[in-house]
Amino acid sequence: MTIHTPTAPVPEPSRRIVAIDIVRGIALLAMASYHFTWDLEFFGYTDPGLTAFGWWKIYARCIASTFLFLVGVSLYLAHGQQIRWNGFWKRFAMVAGAAIAISVVTRIATPDGFIFFGILHEIALASLLGLAFLRLPALLTLVIAALVIAAPVYLRFEALDHPWLWWIGLSAINPRSNDYVPLFPWFGAVLVGIGVAKLASASGLRARLASLMPGRWANPLVFIGRHSLAFYLIHQPLLIGCVWLFSQIMPAQVETVQVNFLKTCQRSCEQTRNATFCSSYCSCMLTTLEGEAALDRLENNDQTAEFRAHLGDLAARCTGQTEDKMDEGGTQ
């Protein structure tokens, strides 16, 4: 007589979700468009500060948030049931190695704004820290994500102003870097991705997404999305090289430090005030800085506490003078 012992069904290997590759591919192309605009600004073909304010700034943050959200989603899909250590460490080493390489290269090429903790540094660290959240309830993960995202708004510490601690993101100053993506608030986007992936798995949405098979139109996006690290490392040197070659044929008009200051100041000021106010305010700031021979210190990104405090005093003084002048002229 044969006794049949019931056994647990062997789960089928999870199917790769093509939709995630497509979204990642779209985000990579969006990133390339932003970097190309930044390259044009860097070589003087657009106004200074173009990509640092307004819609371009929002665009950049949406791109970074999308990448980090997908990091959280992918981390849970790959290791949510059981951490596959060999695969995890292999991927971690690739991302961390690329991040270190970018720091070294940018330190040589652009020492005033080199990338000491950019998007790849954040992805590497967030992937490591994210492992601790894979087994937590989804709602708890999302609550912690909200706290991480909100932390820089409410928590700033001068004790963290040391360059070795800037990666945390809670210092009183915003350090100068061509790509600055610190732990706070950006780790929150990764946690959101983990939390959403948990909810999607529990609700059956994950299975439905896995069953979606897009047409051939998506093949380029899928290819880019599946080779995201290679695309990231290659696209910017290629783009900046093309702009550099163009600049050798048709150089951009060289502006003075004063003109660049006024343009950047005006663009920044107009995020909260009207153009008339900003024009007067920026002229006041420029005149004062030139009178003190301090414009070079600002241009060289002097981050000493003394100079930052002095700039705050100058800003308050010029704001008061400009408001008085506009009140006298009856301009709102």
Image (tube, grey):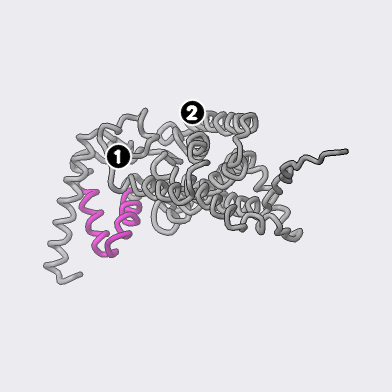
Q: Is residue 37 visible?
A: no
Name the residue tied to disc 1: 173
The tally of labels here is: 2
In the rendering, at what x and y percent does residue 70 appear?
56, 48
Q: Quadrant of residue 209?
A: bottom right
Which residue is denoted by mark 2 in the rendering? 108
Q: Residue at x 16, y 45 (%)?
A: 313
Tag of residue 258: none
Q: Nearer the viewer, mark 2 or mark 1?
A: 1
Q: What amino acid is at disc 1?
A: Ile
Q: Is residue 275 above or below residue 100?
A: below
Q: Quadrant of residue 164?
A: top left
- Tell me: 101 left or right of 287: right
Q: Secondary structure at mark 2?
A: helix
151 and 204: which one is in front?
Answer: 204
Magenta stretch: includes residue 230: no
Q: Is residue 269 magenta?
A: yes
Q: Which residues are magenta?
A: 261-287
Question: What residue is shown at x 28% (from left), y 36% (from top)?
Answer: 297
Q: Position of residue 192 (x, y in %)?
A: 48, 50
Mark 2 residue type: Ile
